[in-house]
C-alpha cells in the first residue's frame, strides 16, 4: 500500500497541477475572447445566412427539350468574315442556323443554314428565349439585355463562363438571368434579395473585398483565435469536471455560456478548423483559356441522324464536328443549368459524312493544352453530371475527365464543345475538398435531405453565435468591473 503521507502529497501535487492548468486555460480563454467572439459572430452569422440564401434564391426551371437538326440536311457554308473561336450548327426559331464567335468578339453571330443570310440580332433574341425558359417567365417585359464579356459587379469570376448575356426582367424582384447562348445554358439566376444576401455574405464571410495579404492574415488571426478559444473552453470544462471544481451556484449567464459552449463547441471547432484549412489549402483554379482559333471550316456534307448540335473542333491537324445528342431527363438538381450531355460513353465525332474516332485524341490534346504532361498514360471518361470532386460550382458540362498515373493522381477536366479548361484536381485537392464537404458543409448528413442538413448546420452555427454573444457579455462585464 502507498503510505498515507505519500498519497496525500501526490493528491496535493495533482491538485496544484490542475489548479495551474485551470488558471492558464482561464486566462487565455478570456484574453482571446474578443477576437474569438468577433470571428464567431462574423462567420457564424454569415454561415447561417448561406442556407437561407440558398432557400430564398430564385430556382431555375428546366427548359423544354430542344429539337434535333433535320437528318440528311445539307447546310449552306457560312461566310464568317475572318477567324473564329467557336462555330456550331444549331437551331434558331425552328430552323437550322450557323452560330459563331469571332476571334475578338463578345457576341455571337448567326446565319440561316438554308440560305446563308445573316440573322440580325439573333444572339440577343436567343438570349431572351433562354432567359425566359430558365426563369420560367414567358410574359414579363424585359427591361435590359446587355452582353457581358468580363467578370465583375453582379457577375463575379466564380461564374466562370464568358461571354454571356445579362437579361433583366421588368419585375418588382429584379429577376436577372445570365445565359450562355453558345452552349444554351444558364450561368446564374439572381434577384434583388439574392444580390443583397450575397453582398452581405461576401462582406462578412469570404472577404472578397480585401486584398489577398489582408484577407489571409485577417481571417487567419480571427479564426485562429476563435479555434483556440473554443478548444480551450472545452478543455477547461473537461479539466474542471474531472477535478469536480465546477460550481453549480455560479451566476446564470456564466452557466448558460458554459452549458451552451459545451453542447455546441465541437461543432464550432469543426466549422472553424475546416474553414482555416480551406483558406490555406484550397487552390484557385486557373481561368479557362480561350478556345483556339479555327483555321478553317470543316466540310459538312450532311447532318447525321439525332444531332442536337454540331460544334466544329480542331484535333491536331484535323477538323471535325463534335456530335451533341439530346440527353435523357436527369434527376440531378443542377443539371438543368446546362446543355444536354451525351448519354453514356464518349462523344461522337463527324467528318462531315462519316464518323471519326477522335474522342481520346481530342481529350488528350485539350488536357495537354491545360498543362497536363504530354505523352503520359491517361484514362479518359466523360462526366455528364456534377458530383464528387467535380461539383456544381465548376459550371461546365459535359466535360472530359483525363486521369494521369502521376504523383498526386491529377485529373484534368476539359470541355470538348468549347475547348475550355475547367479544373485540375489531385489528391491534395481531393483531401481538402473532402474535409470541407464533410466538416464545413456537413455532407455526411446528406441522407437526411438537403433541407434537413441545412437546418441542422444553420442551427448549430446560430447556437455558437449565441454562446459567443454570452461570452462577450461576460468579458465586457469583467472588463468594466476592473
Image: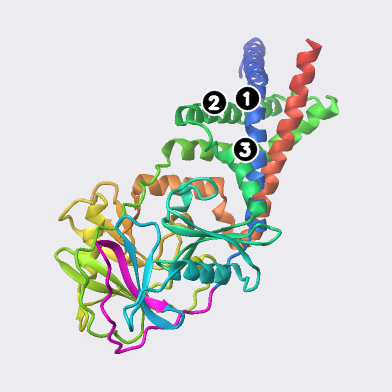
Identify the secondary structure beneath mark 1.
Answer: helix
Q: Nearer the viewer, residue 463 or 68?
A: 68
Q: Position of residue 64 (x, y in %)?
A: 53, 78
Q: Nearer the viewer, residue 221 or 151?
A: 151
Task: Tell me the magenta residue range.
Answer: 63-91
Q: From where the camera sits, is residue 266 visible?
A: yes
Q: Position of residue 416 (x, y in %)?
A: 31, 65
Furthest-bottom residue in view? 72
Distance from disc 3 to disc 1, alpha carbons, whole Å, reads 12 Å
Q: Quadrant of the C terminus?
A: top right
Distance from disc 2 to disc 3, alpha carbons, whole Å, reads 13 Å
Identify the secondary structure beneath mark 2.
Answer: helix
Going from the N terminus, do you reach mark 2 or mark 1 first? 1
Going from the N terminus, do you reach mark 2 or mark 3 first? 3
Q: Main secondary structure of the magenta part?
A: loop
| Residue annotated with mark 2 | 221
Whether tag 2 and tag 1 are in contact, CB under 8 A, the answer is yes
* In magenta segment, residue 69: yes
Q: Position of residue 85 (x, y in %)?
A: 29, 61
Snapshot colouring = rainbow
| Residue annotated with mark 3 | 43
| Residue annotated with mark 1 | 35
Q: From where the camera sits, is residue 400 visible?
A: no
Q: Position of residue 405 (x, y in %)?
A: 23, 54
In the displayed structure, would residue 102 be above or below residue 211? below
Q: Is disc 2 surrounded by few (<14), some (14 to 19) or many (20+) residues within 10 Å? A: some
In the picture, the disc for residue 170 is none
Amino acid at each position: 500500500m502507498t503510505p498515507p503521507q505519500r498519497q496525500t502529497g501526490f493528491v496535493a501535487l495533482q491538485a496544484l497541477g490542475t489548479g495551474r492548468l485551470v488558471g492558464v486555460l482561464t486566462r487565455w480563454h478570456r484574453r482571446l475572447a474578443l477576437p474569438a467572439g468577433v470571428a464567431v459572430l462574423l462567420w457564424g452569422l454569415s454561415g447561417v445566412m448561406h442556407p437561407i440564401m440558398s432557400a430564398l434564391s430564385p430556382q431555375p426551371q428546366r427548359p423544354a427539350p430542344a429539337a434535333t437538326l433535320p437528318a440528311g440536311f445539307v447546310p449552306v457554308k457560312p461566310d464568317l468574315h475572318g477567324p473564329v473561336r467557336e462555330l456550331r450548327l444549331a437551331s434558331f426559331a425552328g430552323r437550322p442556323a450557323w452560330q459563331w464567335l469571332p476571334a475578338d468578339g463578345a457576341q455571337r453571330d448567326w446565319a440561316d443554314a438554308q440560305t446563308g443570310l445573316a440573322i440580325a440580332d439573333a444572339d440577343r433574341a436567343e438570349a431572351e428565349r433562354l432567359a425566359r425558359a430558365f426563369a420560367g417567365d414567358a410574359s414579363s417585359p424585359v427591361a435590359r439585355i446587355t452582353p457581358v464579356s468580363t467578370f465583375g459587379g453582379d457577375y463575379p469570376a466564380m461564374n466562370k463562363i464568358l461571354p454571356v448575356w445579362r437579361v433583366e426582367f421588368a419585375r418588382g424582384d429584379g429577376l436577372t438571368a445570365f445565359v450562355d447562348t453558345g452552349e444554351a445554358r444558364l450561368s446564374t439566376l439572381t434577384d434583388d434579395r439574392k444580390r443583397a444576401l450575397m453582398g452581405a455574405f461576401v462582406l462578412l464571410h469570404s472577404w472578397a473585398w480585401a486584398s489577398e495579404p489582408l484577407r489571409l492574415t485577417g481571417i487567419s488571426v480571427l479564426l485562429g483565435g476563435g479555434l483556440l478559444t473554443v478548444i480551450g473552453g472545452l478543455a477547461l470544462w473537461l479539466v474542471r469536471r474531472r477535478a469536480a471544481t465546477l460550481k453549480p451556484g455560479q451566476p446564470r449567464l456564466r452557466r448558460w455560456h458554459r452549458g451552451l459552449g459545451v453542447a455546441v463547441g465541437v461543432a464550432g471547432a469543426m466549422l472553424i478548423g475546416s474553414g482555416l484549412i480551406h483558406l490555406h489549402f484550397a487552390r484557385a483554379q486557373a481561368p479557362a483559356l480561350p478556345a483556339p482559333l479555327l483555321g478553317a471550316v470543316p466540310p459538312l456534307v450532311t447532318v447525321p441522324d439525332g444531332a442536337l448540335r454540331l460544334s466544329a473542333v480542331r484535333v491536331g491537324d484535323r477538323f471535325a464536328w463534335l456530335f451533341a445528342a439530346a440527353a435523357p431527363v436527369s434527376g440531378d438538381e443542377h443539371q438543368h443549368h446546362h446543355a444536354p450531355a451525351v448519354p453514356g460513353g464518349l462523344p461522337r465525332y463527324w467528318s462531315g459524312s462519316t464518323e471519326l474516332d477522335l474522342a481520346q485524341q481530342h481529350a488528350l490534346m485539350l488536357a495537354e493544352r491545360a498543362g497536363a504532361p504530354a505523352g503520359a498514360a491517361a484514362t479518359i471518361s466523360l462526366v455528364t453530371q456534377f458530383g464528387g470532386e467535380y461539383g456544381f460550382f465548376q459550371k461546365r458540362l459535359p466535360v472530359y475527365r483525363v486521369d494521369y498515373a502521376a504523383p498526386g493522381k491529377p485529373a484534368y477536366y476539359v470541355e470538348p464543345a468549347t475547348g475550355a479548361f475547367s479544373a485540375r484536381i489531385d489528391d491534395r485537392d481531393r483531401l481538402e475538398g473532402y474535409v470541407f464537404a464533410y466538416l464545413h458543409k456537413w455532407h455526411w448528413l446528406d441522407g437526411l435531405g438537403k433541407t434537413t442538413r441545412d437546418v441542422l448546420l444553420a442551427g448549430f452555427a446560430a447556437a455558437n453565435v449565441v454562446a459567443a454573444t454570452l461570452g462577450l457579455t461576460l468579458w465586457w462585464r469583467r472588463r468594466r468591473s476592473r
